[in-house]
Image: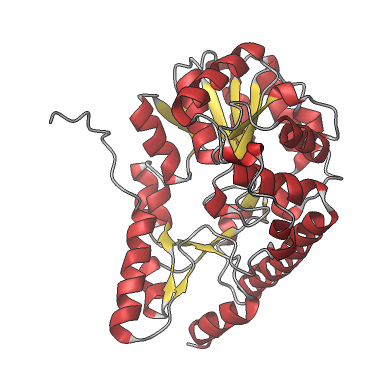
Amino acid sequence: MKIKESGVALSHIVEIGENLAALSARTGAEYLRLNRGINSVVNIDLREVIAGIDFNTAQMQTYPPGRGFAALRDAINAEYFGGESSRDNLLIVPGAMNGLDLLAQSVDIERLYLPVYYWGCYFKLLTIRGVQRAEYPSLDRLESMIPRLTGCGVLICDPGNPLGQKYDDARLLALLRKLDAAGVTVFFDSPYRRVFRDATDTFYREIRPLRNVAIVESFSKSMGLSGQRIGFIHTTDPGLYAELEKRTMYTNNGVNAFAQTLVLRLLTTPEGRRAVADFKAATVRDIGLNIAYLKENGLLATEFYRESMPVGIFAIVDRSEKELLEHRIGSVSLDFFTRDAALAGYASRFSRICVSVPHTKFREFFDPLVRR
């Protein structure tokens, strides 16, 4: 059988996880798996929410509509856009990664500019789809690059992965408006924002009218639903929407009806809103405590946050992956997240960790490192 090879390898992060599992099995010792990008402070409590779902309805037992349930798209419009957008600008997709893949397939651009430190899956996705890439050093530098971005696209992740950086919203909004006015396509990937915000947040309402900005969101981080694989794309460009709808139909034939029903109940029912609020409160509390701990003990690599704040579920620490592993802490070396050869040696001194774990467990593993 002749294979069309993708040209990419399986995830290094998954490989690290398998290595940690093997080490734990061999030694009998616990390893703190901060290599993963999953909110692990608490699980969202879905017992009351699921109790109200009737699995025997026609909606649950037939193919879901290609765009996603109308009621879910209306609920997303209300929750994320204050009711100022439309269900016809929203497409339900099986996770943000699928949404980014659909955009990479559908938008005709010369190349996509990524931040110099970026999530490795961006590169692999673009390689599989045959989309050329380039890098930009920071959002502050991106504005000066606008004259040479004609015909290209830019991917912005805020709060970011791998750095966990959060830029000032006013500066970010001004930049998005300038990119849009210049006709530059923007993929705005923001799966972490709603961990820290709620329906009072107006940022998506502000960027909603921007024709060249497509928002990719998921419920993995903000609701703890990574296993359900569900998210959405928002675009006000009718041509892009029509193409995305066709591609998602013939790729996925709709998104899992249970996942859609679950998210709808989390957004619209009292028990659902309560479950989400409780999940977020515990998650945000321990993330904040863990970042504060890193700062207080000189572990946070502050040079990566001169233009931003460490707010997301990730942070960069001033320790190598090897050194952390010696203390049974799983991490990912920062050089994994850049293709800039000039930065690789420098970046290998640092590691990305997920800070969304219980604070007591975080201290249990980091205290011996601090005392050393």
In the picture, which quadrant includes the N terminus? top left
Pick out the residue farthest to the left.
1
Q: Looking at the picture, tell me which residue is in the foreground, 6 or 247.
A: 247
Q: Position of residue 44 (x, y in %)?
A: 67, 63
Q: Quadrant of residue 348?
A: bottom left
Q: Looking at the image, how many numbered discs can be counted on the residues?
A: 0
Q: Position of residue 315 (x, y in %)?
A: 57, 60
Q: Quadrant of residue 327?
A: bottom left
Relative to 193, is 102 on the left or the right? Answer: left
* Vertical order, 275 against 257 (above or below): below
Q: Position of residue 318 (x, y in %)?
A: 49, 66
Relative to 74, is 217 on the left or the right? Answer: left
Q: Looking at the picture, tell me which residue is in the foreground, 97 or 334.
A: 97
- The residue that appears at 40% across and 35% down in the rendered structure is 125
Relative to 177, is 11 on the left or the right? Answer: left
Relative to 270, is 240 on the left or the right? Answer: left
- The residue that appears at 55% across and 71% down in the rendered structure is 299
Q: Would you say residue 253 is visible in this rendering? A: yes
Q: Position of residue 94 (x, y in %)?
A: 54, 39
Q: Quadrant of residue 320?
A: bottom left
Q: Would you say residue 217 is visible in this rendering? A: no
* Vertical order, 30 against 178 (above or below): below
